[in-house]
Image (spheres, coloured by chain):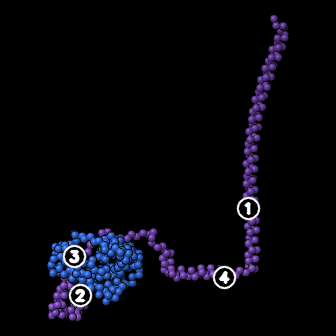
């Protein structure tokens, strides 16, 4: 087809109003273009036979506060690249400084002295606290033992007193018995020999 | 249509501030179109549905990056296009996918059911690019400039794909157009 009009653009409604008029004028006088446009329109109509399907399941999203960003996350996300970059830079600088910096001997000596003093102080503190705790624990144990011994002694004394009273009662009974017997012998001797 | 656009704009603004309910309303307006676009590209309902969900999730996550809410349709379909082609690339070895015709979907009296099947079959014979151009133009009503945005290609490429597809479809559907016997699809390729 040698005609220069864009029939397909016309058929799919892509032409502005003025250009549509040009095409319509041309088609009126050009049979081949008219037939071609008819075929395009029929093709368009045939394509529209396919209707849209309903979606099988509705799509919906649920608001879940668990997954919502916290305030600090929001702040962080506002400039994370810059923040991360600066942190990484700082960390790298510290690391490089730690590896590259020579250690001064005087500083080391001072540090060792400081460490020794601190160690002594800590040790003294620990010993002091340990001793006081031991003293308290010992005193408590002694008190407990003494109290227990006193209780046992009191119990023994009470038992001895009971026993003593029981013995006295037995002795008294025996004395009474012998006194009665003596009295009986005396009566018998006064009355003469037994016949 | 103007009111619809304004409302979409409001919903987009609200949704980008984290209002999920506003976003759900927006989804309900666009899900059918996105689903059908994806269905005509990937030709599997489950895939189209899964992709639709992915598309709307990605859209929600990136809504703040949308500079002009008026461009939301093209932006949304751009995401859908990327998702669909990602899947098509994965599935390319099994490109001969089966499409189960749904007999209940005939247009209802004006054309015989064979016509619907013929149209479906003719569309399937097109290349992915050509079919997508037809879907975006004929079924989704996008303009060439919007299609170029969605497909990330020049308008000239869009027109070339669409015009080639229309020529092929015109030949393939000629028996329908002239009211003849069921079409001979051999002429499409």
The mark that comes first in sequence, 2 or 4, is 2
Instruction: Give the CA separation, mark 3 to mark 2.
Output: 21 Å
Q: Earlier in the sequence, mark 4 or mark 1?
A: 4
Q: Earlier in the sequence, mark 2 or mark 1?
A: 2
In the rendered image, the vertical position of residue A187 relative to residue B34, given as above or below: above
Say which of A112 and A188 sits in front: A112
Query: Label 4 to label 1, Cα distance in Å?
Result: 43 Å
Query: Which numbered disc covers residue B118?
Result: 3
- SS for callout 3: helix
| Residue A56 seen in render | yes
Question: Which of the chains is blue?
Answer: B
CA separation, marks 3 and 4? 77 Å
Q: Chain of mark 1?
A: A
The location of residue B114, given as percent across then percent down, is 19, 73
In three-dimensional space, the C-alpha distance between marks 3 and 1, rounded to whole angstroms, equals 97 Å
Disc marking residue A14: none
Disc ID at residue A8:
2
What is the chain letter for disc 2?
A
Query: Residue under circle 1?
Result: A129
Q: Which residue position holds label 4?
A: A100
Colour in which the image shows chain A = purple
Q: Within the image, what quadrant is residue A134 found in?
A: bottom right
């Amino acid at each position: 087809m040698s005609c220069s009009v864009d029939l397909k653009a016309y058929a799919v409604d892509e032409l502005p109003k003025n250009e549509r008029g040009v095409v319509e004028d041309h088609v009126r006088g050009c049979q081949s273009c008219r037939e071609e446009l008819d075929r395009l329109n029929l093709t368009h109509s045939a394509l529209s036979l396919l209707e849209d399907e309903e979606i099988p399941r509705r799509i919906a999203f649920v608001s879940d506060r668990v997954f919502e960003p916290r305030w600090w996350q929001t702040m962080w996300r506002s400039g994370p690249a810059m923040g991360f970059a600066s942190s990484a830079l700082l960390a790298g600088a510290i690391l490089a400084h730690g590896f590259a910096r020579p250690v001064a001997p005087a500083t080391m000596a001072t540090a060792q002295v400081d460490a020794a003093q601190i160690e002594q102080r800590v040790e003294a503190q620990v010993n002091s606290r340990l001793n006081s705790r031991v003293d308290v624990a010992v005193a408590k144990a002694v008190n407990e033992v003494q109290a227990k011994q006193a209780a046992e002694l009191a119990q023994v004394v009470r038992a001895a007193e009971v026993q003593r009273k029981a013995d006295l009662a037995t002795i008294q009974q025996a004395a009474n018995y012998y006194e009665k017997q003596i009295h009986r012998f005396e009566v018998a001797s006064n009355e003469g020999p037994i016949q | 249509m103007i009111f619809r656009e304004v409302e979409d704009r409001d919903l987009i603004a609200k949704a980008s501030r984290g209002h999920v309910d506003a976003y759900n309303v927006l989804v309900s307006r666009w899900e059918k179109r996105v689903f059908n676009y994806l269905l005509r590209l990937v030709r599997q309902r489950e895939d189209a549905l899964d992709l639709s969900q992915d598309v709307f999730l990605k859209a929600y996550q990136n809504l703040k990056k949308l500079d002009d809410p008026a461009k939301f349709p093209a932006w949304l379909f751009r995401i859908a296009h990327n998702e669909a082609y990602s899947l098509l690339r994965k599935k390319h070895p099994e490109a001969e996918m089966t499409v189960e015709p749904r007999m209940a979907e005939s247009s209802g009296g004006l054309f015989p059911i064979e016509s619907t099947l013929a149209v479906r079959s003719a569309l399937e014979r097109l290349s992915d690019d050509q079919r997508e151009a037809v879907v975006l133009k004929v079924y989704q009503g996008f303009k060439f400039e919007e299609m170029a945005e969605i497909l990330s290609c020049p308008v000239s490429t869009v027109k070339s794909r669409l015009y080639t597809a229309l020529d092929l479809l015109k030949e393939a559907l000629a028996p329908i157009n002239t009211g003849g016997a069921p079409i001979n699809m051999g002429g499409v390729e």
